[in-house]
């Protein structure tokens, strides 16, 4: 199991993973815990340099990380499953927000996934689609921060 985060403070499930996994590898961007660098560097070291054999890689996390894990594992012909649960909105496929191209075909994450072959996912398209909601997410976060600070909007901008 490889866990990655920006820093030690952002790591989650470390003790749970230690209890379950035969081997736990940690990578932090700042080097505050484990390997300094990205999870892809750990994959590269274990599979590429040390010649470790794994039957499958499962990547769960930020879209950009899953993209580069899939690109890394593809070089080693290592089966890779990614979880695209972040794309789901309504869970029925009706809204189309979860649409993703996998192996050149349109798939609906909330109905047909969220797990897919990482080597078949069009991550660039998926990241563009995910970005469509970023401004709304930021707007909602700002509204919630204002509410938490005690601000009450009286002109309806917090709807």
Image (spheres, rainbow, N blue to C red):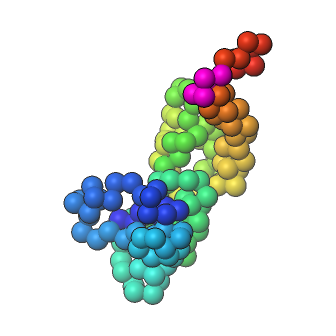
All told, the count of numbered labels is 0
Residue placed most toward the observer, 34 or 73: 34
In this rendering, would 130 be left or right of 29? right
Q: Which residues are magenta?
A: 147-151
**Toward the viewer: 140 or 95?**
140
Viewer-proximal residue among 28 and 91 = 28
Outermost residue, front direction? 150
Query: Quadrant of the image for the C terminus?
Result: top right
Towards the viewer: 5 or 50: 5
Residue beneath the point at 42% across and 70% down? 33
Residue 53 x %, y %: 36, 77
Q: How far across and down, in percent of the image, does residue 150 sit?
A: 60, 23
Q: Is residue 54 shown above or below 96? A: below
Please determine whether, in this image, residue 4 is positioned above or below residue 87. Answer: below
Image vertical order of residue 6 relative to residue 111, above or below: below
Residue 155 at what x, y percent from top left?
A: 77, 13
Q: Main secondary structure of the magenta part?
A: loop
Question: Which quadrant of the rendered structure holds the N terminus?
Answer: bottom left
- Residue drawn at (66%, 48%), measured in percent from left and top? 126
Furthest residue to the bottom? 49
* Residue 97 falls left or right of residue 21: right
Q: Is residue 129 visible?
A: no
What residue is rendered at 60% in x and 28% in y? 149
Q: Is residue 158 visible?
A: yes
Residue 69: x and y in percent read: 53, 66
Quick check: is 97 in the magenta stretch?
A: no
Quick check: 22 above or below 127? below
- Looking at the image, which residue is at 23% across and 59% down? 20
Residue furthest left in the image: 19
Which corner quadrant of the image does residue 154 belong to? top right
């Amino acid at each position: 199991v490889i866990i990655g985060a920006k820093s030690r403070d952002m790591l989650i499930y470390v003790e749970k993973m230690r209890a379950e996994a035969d081997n736990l590898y940690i990578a932090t961007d700042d080097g505050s815990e484990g390997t300094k660098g990205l999870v892809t560097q750990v994959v590269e070291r274990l599979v590429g340099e040390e010649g470790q054999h794994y039957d499958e890689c499962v990547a769960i996390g930020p879209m950009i990380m899953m993209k580069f894990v899939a690109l890394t594992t593809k070089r080693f012909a290592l089966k890779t499953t990614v979880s695209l649960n972040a794309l789901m909105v309504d869970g029925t496929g009706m809204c189309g927000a979860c649409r993703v191209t996998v192996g050149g075909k349109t798939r609906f994450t909330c109905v047909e996934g969220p797990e897919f072959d990482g080597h078949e996912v069009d991550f660039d398209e998926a990241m563009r689609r995910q970005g469509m909601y970023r401004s709304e997410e930021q707007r909602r976060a700002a509204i919630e921060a204002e509410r938490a600070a005690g601000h009450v909007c009286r002109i309806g901008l917090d709807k």
